[in-house]
Image: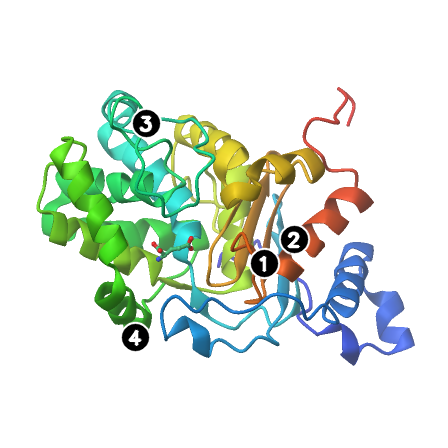
Amino acid sequence: MTSGSHVASAQPAKASSAAWTSSRPPLLRFLDRCHADFVAETGGDVARYIPELSKADPSHFGISLATLDGHVYEVGDTKVPFTIQSMSKPFVFALALDTLGAERVESVIGVEPSGDPFNSIRLNAENHPFNPMVNAGAIACSGLVHEAKGAGAFEHIRRELSRFAGRDLGVDEAVYRSESLTGDRNRAIGYLLRTNAVIKDNVAEVLDVYFRQCAILVTARDIAIMAATLANRGINPVTGEQVTTPYAIARTLSVMTSSGMYDYAGEWIYRIGIPAKSGVGGGILSALPARLGLGSYSPRLDRHGNSVRGIRVCAALSRHYDLHMLNRSDDA
Ligand code: GLU
């Protein structure tokens, strides 16, 4: 982290005393309240499609918000590592756009919402993935990066995601192995993509990149900063580094808006109005352009695969600060 950044307190809400509470900035007090209110929400369940994810502690709950001037606000379990899963998809899409160019990427991946579950094997009328936020499109993106970087593809992805987070990110090897051992549906998608010339390289190698990228470890704090980098036209507000091009960022936020929240995407943008992506590890990353990045972690998922508490936090934040992106005026 650069010396210019400021980190607000990371104390959980329950630790607050009256005097300490009143000295906390209003935004942090709001996040405290969200944490205290929504920690009581015990609906939903941890992901169980691989044994490793079912070991997640359902009580974990962290909220982090990064502003574009580099302040990072944190409440609760914001230092607990968990796997990024589908939240890797927007970043690898941005990376594919910057690495291979929009023309190449758009020649094999669409941008329409699919209306299908994230792991659907259906392709669009051109036999291409519907968009980069479903597994087929994300595997195609990993394939494109593999096309450009060969055996160095995963390391390239890991390094780029680390620049978004502003620190070196590792991999949960147990989750990676578990994904790989049980990933036949994703392999089926991979072979379907190859037979339609969306993937040109060896499918097993591409899938290995995809499984590893899903197993990258992040915290709620990391995803708040990664989201803030998306909201800041590709400049990490904590490190000051230009991580990716504004062009790739605008396209990435577009597909997050239309397809980021599984088959809840329409409802999400209607009610909350902030481009977002969730992952079955329990994270939700929300990026409001020119404003903020929000990262939440709570592994209890609803039937769509979205974190139950994470949705509550985003909805409360959007409502309280009037953040719906389609409810703006010039002087906002
Ligand atoms: N690794 C998971 C899969 O490809 C990602 C699922 C998700 O987070 O949506 O099935």
Tell which of 307 and 222 is nearer to you.
307
Mark 1 within 8 Å of ligand 1, using the beta carbon: no
Q: Amino acid at mark 4?
A: Ala
Which of the marked residues, 1 or 3, is nearer the chain's N terminus?
A: 3
**Residue at which label 1 appears:** 302
107, above or below 144, in the image = above
Tell me the residue at 35%/62% (across/down): 216
Q: Where's residue 87, x and y in %? A: 44, 51
Q: Earlier in the sequence, mark 2 or mark 1?
A: 1
| Mark positioned earlier in the residue sequence (3 or 2) | 3
Residue in the image at 43% along x and 28% along y: 251
What residue is shown with label 4? 174
Q: Quadrant of the C terminus?
A: top right
Mark before the other along the chain sequence, 4 or 3: 3
In this rendering, the label closer to the viewer, 4 or 3: 3
* Tag 2 and tag 1, C-beta contact below 8 Å: yes
Q: Is residue 16 visible?
A: yes
Q: Do labels 3 and 2 touch, CB within 8 Å?
A: no
Residue matched to label 3 = 124
The response on whether ligand 1 sits within 8 Å of label 2 is no
Secondary structure under tag 1 reads: loop
Badge 2 density bin: few <14, some 14–19, many ≥20, Cα 10 Å: many
**How far, Cα to Cα, is label 2 from label 1?**
10 Å
Q: Looking at the image, do the residues carrying marks 1 and 3 touch, with CB atoms under 8 Å apart? A: no
Q: Is residue 61 above or below residue 94?
A: below
- Along the line of sight, which residue is nearer the eye, 116 or 139? 116
The residue tagged 2 is: 311
Name the mark nearer the viewer: 2 or 1: 1
